[in-house]
């Protein structure tokens, strides 16, 4: 699944490790999500959405047309 996490992290001057700590996951998990190799669970997606104060739909983009 495509997403805007890397862009949002840059806008908030945040590292993968910092986001991972805030979400209680590993940095590797954030890296895999950013690269589209792992789809986050719904609770994790809501956590990320809340941290960036963006709707889930604005962060995670459906790449299946």
Image: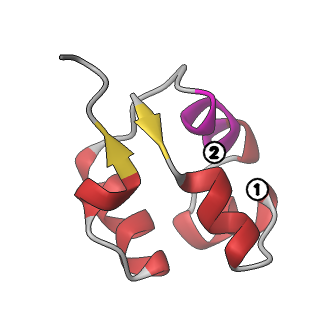
Image coordinates for residue 45, horizontal then vertical, percent:
34, 54
User: Does the image show residue 44?
Assistant: no
**Front position in the image: 2 or 43:** 2
- Position of residue 36 in the picture relative to residue 64 (left or right): right
Q: Taking 31 as reference, is 41 left or right?
A: left
Q: Is residue 53 above or below residue 34?
A: below
> Which quadrant does the C terminus fall into?
top left
Residue drawn at 74 percent across, 47 percent down: 27
Which residue position is annotated with label 2? 30
Q: Taking the image as drawn, is residue 11 in sight? A: yes
**Helix, strand or loop status at disc 2:** helix
- Residue 16 tag number: 1
Asked whether disc 2 touches disc 1, contact meaning CB atoms under 8 Å apart, the reply is yes
Which residue is nearer to you in this view: 24 or 42?
Answer: 42
Residue 13 in the image: state x and y as whole percent. 80, 77
Identified at 60% across, 66% down, the residue is: 8
Against 46, is 41 above or below? Answer: above
Give me the C-alpha separation between circle 2 and circle 1: 6 Å
Tag 1 secondary structure: helix
5 in the magenta segment:
no
Query: Which residues, given as a range, are shown in magenta?
Result: 29-35
Q: Residues within 10 Å of mark 2 (few under 14, many from 20)?
A: many
Residue at 31% from the left image edge and 24% from the top image edge: 63
Q: Nearer the viewer, residue 52 or 24?
A: 52
Residue 61 picture quarter: top left
Q: How many numbered marks are there?
A: 2
Using residue 2 as the reference point, say whether residue 11 is left or right of it. Answer: right
Q: Which dot marks residue 62?
A: none
């Amino acid at each position: 699944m495509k997403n805007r996490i890397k862009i949002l992290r840059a806008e908030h001057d945040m590292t993968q490790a910092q986001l991972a700590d805030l979400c209680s996951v590993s940095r590797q998990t954030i890296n895999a999500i950013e690269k589209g190799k792992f789809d986050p669970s719904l609770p994790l997606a809501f956590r990320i959405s809340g941290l960036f104060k963006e709707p889930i739909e604005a962060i995670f983009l459906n790449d299946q047309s």
